[in-house]
Amino acid sequence: ALKAGACPVSPRAAAFDPFEDAYQQDPPEYVRWAREEEPVFFSPKLGYWVITRYDDIKAVFRDNITFSPSIALEKIIPTSDEANAVLASYSYAMNRTLVNEDEPAHMARRRVLMEPFTPEALRHHEPMVRRLAREYVDRFIDDGRADLVDQMLWEVPLTVALHFLGIPEEDMDLLRQYSIAHTVNTWGRPKPEEQVRVAHAVGNFWQLAGKILDKMRKDPSGPGWMKYGIRKQADYPEVVTDSYLHSMMMAGIVAAHETTANATANALKLLLQHPSAWREICEDPSLIPNAVEECLRHNGSVPAWRRLVTRDVKIGGIDIPAGSKLLMVMASANHDQRHFEDADALDIRRDNSSDHLTFGYGSHQCMGKNLARMEMQIFLEELSRRLPHMRLCEQTFTYLPNTSFRGPEHLWVEWDPLQNPERRNR
Ligand code: HEM
């Protein structure tokens, strides 16, 4: 029996654990019970309220005053004193960027920094994305077999991200290791010994970000969003602060890179698991933009995001007190039958695919969404044109255990190189 005032937690809510492999393998399936029967529940393991339906999540995203994004980059599981001391030894001071900034500071900053994301500005990046995609495919097209993540989908978005931010290409391998550590540090549940290793990597990432920033400050001319930010700081020092620039130098690499790399790997896996959909886009590439949107809905790369409740409210009829923390499972919202007809089916012609919440919604909605879409479209165009006959190899998919960044660590595909269209056309 429940004590008066105690929080009623069902057995399934008590068992909910987003660090289990089942969550990473298929987030909407993992919380299907909740979406259907207990759409807003308290998770004692996490200390968060978990929100699983489309309308409830959209309402939370819509009101960023009642539901503050300030905890978006906070460690989801507090780490040991030892790991915290390691971070402190690197003067680690990750703070507000945009995604975790409250109003009115957030909107003022977002406005000042928006221009490099306009469709016009993004068009300049398209030839580079296309060239990189072609070069990487050239390297393995005659092999008959490739791990698309290791051989293309991780590095190309990283290179694009570094160019977009204006960062020199050197230190790429180091940045790759560091950015994974940041994901584990923020959204994962590392074991005590791993926490210390992760803390060193995050500390090094922080210091490297500071060094790159100092280099840029000496000559902030030329293309790149971070350089643009440094130039804007001269006019708006209160809006574009030093703390912002240093934090964004680190968070921006992860925001622009891992999200997109994972989203493309998820999309290709999904399409190759649905050979008729894959065949259709190979035959008619004009289907690709909507297919990208449908893949982001069905199998997106950011399955969940956080908010802090700033006043007593009701969500989906449940009383939630001020000070509560929310985990919104957008991957579940994206499979909500109340909003998407036959929600579990992949339908590359679906007319409301782009209603998905994978980019968030409202005043914080992803600023980089059109860059991500452009990259994903180009990768699908190049791969479907040059390797239409590829198929998934037999394999077990593995994922990094964490709440918010999701994509297979490897994606093995195979094909017969003798059947490559560009050979047959010779
Ligand atoms: C914010 C997802 C790619 C930059 C966000 C948010 C999500 C997200 C869920 C939080 C939205 C909210 O709180 O309402 C994704 C996904 C991507 C992607 C799934 C790829 C498929 C990118 C890229 C960039 C980027 C390529 C380029 C720099 C940002 C920025 C914000 C943001 C700056 C903060 C916006 C604000 O708070 O005003 N993204 N993102 N993202 N994203 Fe992305």
Image (cartoon, rainbow, N blue to C red):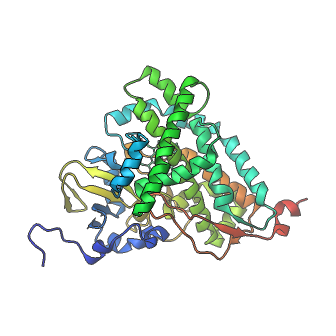
| Residue at 19% over, 49% down | 311
* Relative vertical location of residue 81 with respect to residue 387 in this rendering, above or below: above
Left or right of residue 163, residue 28 in this image:
left
- The quadrant where residue 338 appears: bottom left
* Relative vertical location of residue 123 with respect to residue 229 in this rendering, above or below: below
* Relative vertical location of residue 345 with respect to residue 178 in this rendering, above or below: below
Residue extending farthest bottom = 1
| Residue at 35% over, 40% down | 101
Quarter of the figure with the C terminus: bottom right
| Residue at 50% over, 35% down | 210
- The quadrant where residue 328 appears: bottom left
Residue 201 position within the rendered picture, expressed as x and y whole percent measured from the top left: 50, 50
Residue 27 position within the rendered picture, expressed as x and y whole percent measured from the top left: 44, 68
Residue 21 position within the rendered picture, expressed as x and y whole percent measured from the top left: 46, 71
| Residue at 51% over, 64% down | 299
Residue extending farthest right = 426
Residue extending farthest top = 235
In front of the other: 328 or 271 = 328
Residue 379 position within the rendered picture, expressed as x and y whole percent measured from the top left: 66, 54
Task: Tell me if residue 288 can be seen.
Answer: yes
Task: Tell me if residue 359 can be seen.
Answer: no
Left or right of residue 347, residue 9 in this image:
left
In front of the other: 423 or 14 = 14
Left or right of residue 420, residue 176 in this image:
left
